[in-house]
Image (tube, grey):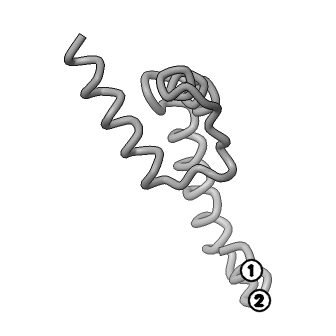
Amino acid sequence: MQSEYVITKERFKLTEIEIESQKIQDLEMHFAGGKKIEVILTWLGMFLGYKLDQKTTTVKEYFVILEEYGKANKKV
């Protein structure tokens, strides 16, 4: 969107950029009950027995790990 704004100079693009930025910030702040993603990755790493790198972990892998973690907690 930012590149589109630079090319077209349409002011509406600035509004779209701001809306998307706010959505990203909301996800970061309210994800998993207000916990930061780094904290959740640390917990999951303890569960798995190895460190999860937030830059190399895919979204799909992350949600599969969360699902398995939830299943393991229900059994306990």
Left or right of residue 47: residue 15? right
Residue 29 figure quarter: top right
Q: Residues within 10 Å of mark 1 (few under 14, many from 20)?
A: few
Q: Quadrant of residue 8?
A: bottom right
The numbered disc on residue 67 is none
Q: Dot 2, how many residues are within 10 Å of its Cα: few (below 14), some (14-19), or many (20+)?
A: few
1 w.r.t. 65: above or below? below
Indicate the amino acid at tag 1.
Ser
Q: Residue furthest bottom?
A: 8
- Vertical order, 26 against 5 (above or below): above
3 lies above or below 47: below
For the point 38% across and 35% down, which residue is it? 66
Residue furthest to the front: 49
* Amino acid at pointer 2: Ile
Closer to us: 37 or 12: 37
> 27 or 39, which lies in front?
39
Q: Secondary structure at mark 2?
A: helix
Residue 65 in picture, x, y percent from top left:
41, 39
Q: Which residue is mark 1?
A: 3
For the residue labelled by badge 1, is the local secondary structure a helix, a strand or a loop?
helix
Q: Residue furthest right?
A: 6
Q: Are marks 2 and 1 in contact (CB under 8 Å)?
A: yes
Residue 10 picture location, percent across and down: 68, 82
Q: Residue at x 53, y 39 (%)?
A: 26
- Residue at point 37% right, 45% down? 64
Quarter-wise, where is residue 71 in the image?
top left
> Which quadrant of the figure contains the N terminus?
bottom right
Q: Residue at x 58, y 33 (%)?
A: 37
Placement of the C terminus among the 4 image quadrants: top left
Q: Which residue is mark 2?
A: 7
Disc 2/disc 1 C-alpha distance (Å):
6 Å
